[in-house]
Amino acid sequence: MFESFNVPGLYIAVQAVLALAASWTSRQVGERTLTGIVIDSGDGVTHVIPVVEGYVIGSCIKHIPIAGRDITYFIQQILREREVGIPPEQSLQTAKAIKEKYCYICPDIVKEFAKYDIDPQKWIKQYTGINAINKNKFIIDIGYERFLGPEIFFHPEVRNSA
């Protein structure tokens, strides 16, 4: 198979080590090392993986039961409580699209709330969707959800208070 696709070689490595190598920028001129912490967050689970000189320290890997799916569910819950015009059968798909397109991490949540309260027109975004059943457009405002969704990584108790 390698010959038919003209593949000169194959390198197999641990994902965390490859992530560290990919994090190097071309502007770095100092000594490059494969030592660091990799946070691998997927849809269902997050792992914190320590890597020293290219080797994963398996006994120190930490599992965190919060991941992308939890952010999606949290955003879905916030949107449902606001009673916006999202078709119920599309609420999960809409929440996922909002998470992927508009969410971000903020350094100070109190300042972020204040920023939105002072000038909402500047920070609130609009999401436009199409109802899968009747093909009508629906438009919803996306405000606090933009930074509250990812905040559950740092303050998991937030998701229980919504």
Image: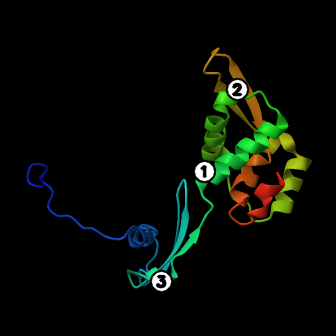
Near-viewer residue (49 or 34)? 49
Q: Name the residue under label 3.
A: 59
Residue 140 position within the rendered picture, expressed as x and y whole percent measured from the top left:
76, 32
- Mark 2 lies on a secondary structure that is loop
Q: Name the residue under label 2.
A: 87
| Amino acid of disc 2 | Pro
- Farthest residue to the top: give it: 134
Left or right of residue 5: residue 52: right
- Farthest residue to the left: give it: 3
Vertical position of residue 60 compared to residue 19: above or below: below
Near-viewer residue (154 or 34)? 154
Vertical position of residue 158 compared to residue 122: above or below: below
Q: Is residue 124 visible?
A: no
**Disc 2 and disc 1: Cα gap in Å?**
20 Å
Vertical position of residue 132 compared to residue 27: above or below: above
Q: Can residue 132 be seen in this view?
A: yes
Residue 137 position within the rendered picture, expressed as x and y whole percent measured from the top left:
68, 20
Residue 24: which quarter of the image?
bottom left
**Residue at the spot x=56%, y=70% of the render?**
63
Disc 2 or 1, which lies upstream in sequence?
A: 1
**Residue at the spot x=46%, y=68% of the render?**
23
**Residue at the spot x=40%, y=71% of the render?**
21
**Disc 2 and disc 3: Cα gap in Å?**
46 Å
Residue 141 position within the rendered picture, expressed as x and y whole percent measured from the top left:
78, 35
Q: Name the residue under label 1.
A: 69
Q: Are marks 1 and 3 in contact (CB under 8 Å)?
A: no
| Amino acid of disc 1 | Arg
| Amino acid of disc 3 | Ser
Residue 61 position within the rendered picture, expressed as x and y whole percent measured from the top left:
51, 77
Q: Residues within 10 Å of mark 3 (few under 14, many from 20)?
A: few
Disc 2 or 3, which lies upstream in sequence?
A: 3
